[in-house]
Image: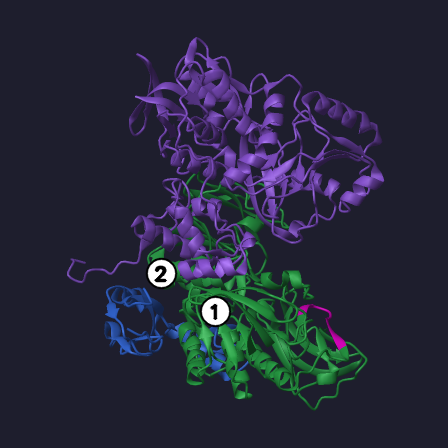
Chain colours: A green, B purple, C blue
Amino acid sequence: MKTVDLAIIGGGSAGLAAAVSAYDEGIRDILILEKDRFLGGILNQCIHPGFGLQEFKEQLTGPEYAERFIEMAKERNIPYRLDTMVMGMTKDKVITYSNAAEGQVRVQAKAVILATGCYERNAGSIAISGDRPSGVITAGLAQRYLNIDGYLVGRKVFILGSGDIGLIMARRMTLEGAKVLGVAEIMPYSNGLNRNIVQCLVDYDIPLYLSHTVTKVTGRHRLEKIEIAQVDDKFAPIPGTEKEFEVDTLMLSVGLIPSNELFDHLGLPQDKTKGAIVDQNLQTGIPGVFSCGNVLHVHDLVDFVSLEGKIAGQTAAKFIKTTETKPTKTIDVLPGLGIGYVVPQKIDISNRGGNISFKFRVKAPVKDTFVTIKQGTTVLKRSFHQVVIPSEMINMTLAASVHIDEATPITVLLEAKQ
Amino acid sequence: MHDVVILGAGVIGAFIARALSRYQLDVIVIDQENDVGNFTSMANSALVHSGYDPEPGLLKALLNVRGNAMYDQVCADLDVVFRRIGSLTVTTKAEELPILKELQERGRRNGVATEILGHAELHALEPELAPEVVYALFAPSAGIVDPFELVVHAMENAIDNGVKLFLNEKVVAINKIDNGYQVVTDRQTHEGRLVVNATGVNSDRVAELVGPNDFSIKPRKGSYFVFDHFDDHFLKHIIFPVPDEWGKGIVVTSSYSYNYLVGPNSNYTDDREDLGTDREAMAYIKEHALRLVPRMPFDKVIRTFSGLRATPSGGDFIIAEASGQPYFINVAGIESPGLAAAPAIAEYVLAHLIKGKLELIPNERYQPRIRPLYRFNRMSDTEIQSLIKQDPRFGHLVCRCEMVSEGHIADALSRSCPPHSIKGVKKRTRAGFGRCQGGFCQPLVLKLLADHYGVTPDQVLYDAQSTFILKEPLGKVNPDENR
Amino acid sequence: MNRVHELICIVCPKGCHLKIDDDLNVSGHDCPRGVVYGKAELLNPTRLLSSTVAIESADLARLPVVTSCEIPKREIFNVMEEIKKVSVAAPVELHQVIIANVCGLGVDVVATRSVKR
């Protein structure tokens, strides 16, 4: 059977950053396996600016950001395969992949980095009521058709969900001559970055209907109209608040889900993030299998994805060089008051490493609050934020010098300003 | 003039076409949809019932049991996934035991072996059943089938044996002429000595085109939840509740593809094209499912859909000559157990309604089997590698959720009943059936269809004729044009 | 009457809620960039514009482009009209100028990726 030191599943932002960082740590026998016909992943279709402020201290478009990392990988001659699908992986890190040139291939890897990104929540799983016409499409798919293939999916559009992808597409479709009649968001606050609310909706006079959802879809073959209604605090539609819109396209931007399907049957412990449970080294429940990027938890800033990819590359490199096995001592990291989830969910005390990066999201928007990392009553780190919102992931780094107690769980929580 | 004109390319039309193709007859099939099996035949529970349920003496009973027995051979010949997993009709009420016994007796009279299980036995078989379930009627001959492959492969076999298929043609008039009938569609006129009306939900209206008919169809809608793959062994049998006046009730079952299916409910509707889903219906179905299988993971639902049953006035299948017209045969009201009965219905129509009217000379070139599919799960590694060497497209996977290759799609396109739409590809290959619902593969499938049919991407359809996915290409404005 | 305008600052992910009056007094910012942004946004709002142009190439159907720096918000659709007219042929270098001095704004439209032949 073929062997490889490091198999990286996914050649998007996370996978590329991991590959470059593993190489820089001395690993040469690397193989990136990418399912699409190009490297760069979803960045290729994110043609808008807003990437790289943290990573490169510049504002780049998606393709520019991707090209930086692709160049880094190519300069280092890191091997990769395109149009290549990983079909499965065993607990012993035997990966089966398939492409036209090689057929189905089995490879024994010493370490594996999962960087498979995420997929869009779609019409099927949110069970929209009404007919089943064509014209209901997820925003990311519409984005691919527009920016990669050069086709408009419709001319009169309504968007469900104020996630960033939907907002970006609201602007993009408008610029290409479509009419976007509105965006409905079921929550009482928007899910997207403020920058996108301003530059995609306010700029183009596209109304945002907060606390609204789509209640009906009409059209036998092609979409003809939709109905939205306001919802109450239990998200049930309020009768009498219905509004109708004549559209040919309903674009869904209702969330992203980590693409973990290859690993469902491996029993990798998962969090409510729908991603794997990892320690600060991004190692999952299977020794030598690491997870980073959107497949670990859905990000909103690609810079954080690259950061995670780098950590995974470094720790995977260390694993290959020293073949450490399971962590011998771990403590839990728990989301406390106001926090939805925290990654990592565990700290491997036996392999502390250097700085520890905690990434988390709050449950609801809060103003003027401390964000605190605590162990028992000891504050490990605390910072003050004027505004925290669920759609913006927060990253707090604990320096290597900060002492961590070996027996007490760590909690990340919000604390009110006294 | 053709010998037989079959109206409707659903499961019934397809099996009748296949049965007729054994003989030297000129047979055509006409359907208004853009694919075969595109209405009721693709939106049902995909169950091959054992046959204890229909009232003994009805055609439903006779043909259900006979059809069920034919399924192993039919699915072997047509390479259709069929698993005879057995069914459990369960109750939480001890006082309903007499109902199960009555069903058992009905089964016995229909020639179906069943067994009544007590609490311990049934929970040993199915640990996920609610603890309140006290008795179950076990019918080992019930099975689950791939309803899409069933119709496509039956029609492919019929076409390979000489039958001609006309899609996207809606029948608007049928005129009696010398020696036969003139079937006028919105595209052309066909003539046939004998007409079979297997048009499903609209069969009463089609029957009226030749004269007053003595039956009517009342469409009855049923909705379903489709679940992601999560545990192939969560349920091992089809789970039925005790039937009520609406029918067999809300079923919870594994499907041919190890997805799970929950549904259907039952609601009469006047709208013969209404396939929408509504919140109340879905909530009702969910509630009833959870009563039987409390841990059914509704957070793993990947799709909902609805189907319309062609419920006949009179309650039994209508398989008979139109009044005073021996060469116009109605095969109507084929609601449950229609799928199970389909091969037997075709056999019956041939034996009782066509034999004696047309000469049945055997077609010596008749081939009952289709060219088998390339199924990786039954090929060895060597066979797969060799296939990919021969045709590298089998190495290029296009659908990640269901692991479908470009080669599989090319193979479907090369067959005699090929897909004409994204949905058609989905039904034949499963590309797009998974949790991402085409999010990744749709652009790739779209391109394959556009290339194969030599059309631009914005001409590729999702399903029926006006269901374009892409509206228009981004045009380069000619700078010489007046602005 | 001195009106107070409410804007959300977009300079960094914090999205501070700014208040600016007609005399350009800014409050609600967390850093000096917010003051600059608030004033500029009121007086002369500008935007980066990204889009795609047609490209003849083996690998790609569309080439992503962006304005080399921000353009006045009111010029967005004029610049889009110019972008829609363009078609290029591979190879293309990263940041290659696709349209120089678009609409006379002193801003170029540049490629945001390289494309081989």
* Residue A19: image location, x then y, percent: 52, 80
Q: Is residue C92 above or below residue A90?
A: below
**Residue under mark 2: which chain is it in?**
A
The magenta span reads A331-341
| Residue B382 in view here | yes
Which residue carries the number 1 mark? A34
Amino acid type of disc 2?
Asp
| Residue A210 in view here | no
Q: Is residue A285 above or below residue B219?
A: below
Relative to A276, is A225 on the left or the right? left
User: Is residue A337 located in the magenta-colored stretch of the structure?
Assistant: yes
Looking at the image, do the residues carrying marks 1 and 2 touch, with CB atoms under 8 Å apart?
no
Task: From the viewer's side, name the closer residue of B466 and C33.
Answer: B466
Q: Secondary structure at mark 1?
A: loop
Which mark sits nearer the N-terminus, 1 or 2? 1
Asked which quadrant contains residue B371, the reply is top left
Q: Quadrant of the C terminus of chain A?
A: bottom right
Task: From the viewer's side, name the closer residue of C23 and A186.
Answer: A186
Q: Which disc is residue A149 wearing?
A: 2
3D distance between C-alphas at marks 1 and 2: 19 Å
Relative to B302, is B238 on the left or the right? right
> Which residue is depicted at the point 25% across and 77% down?
C101
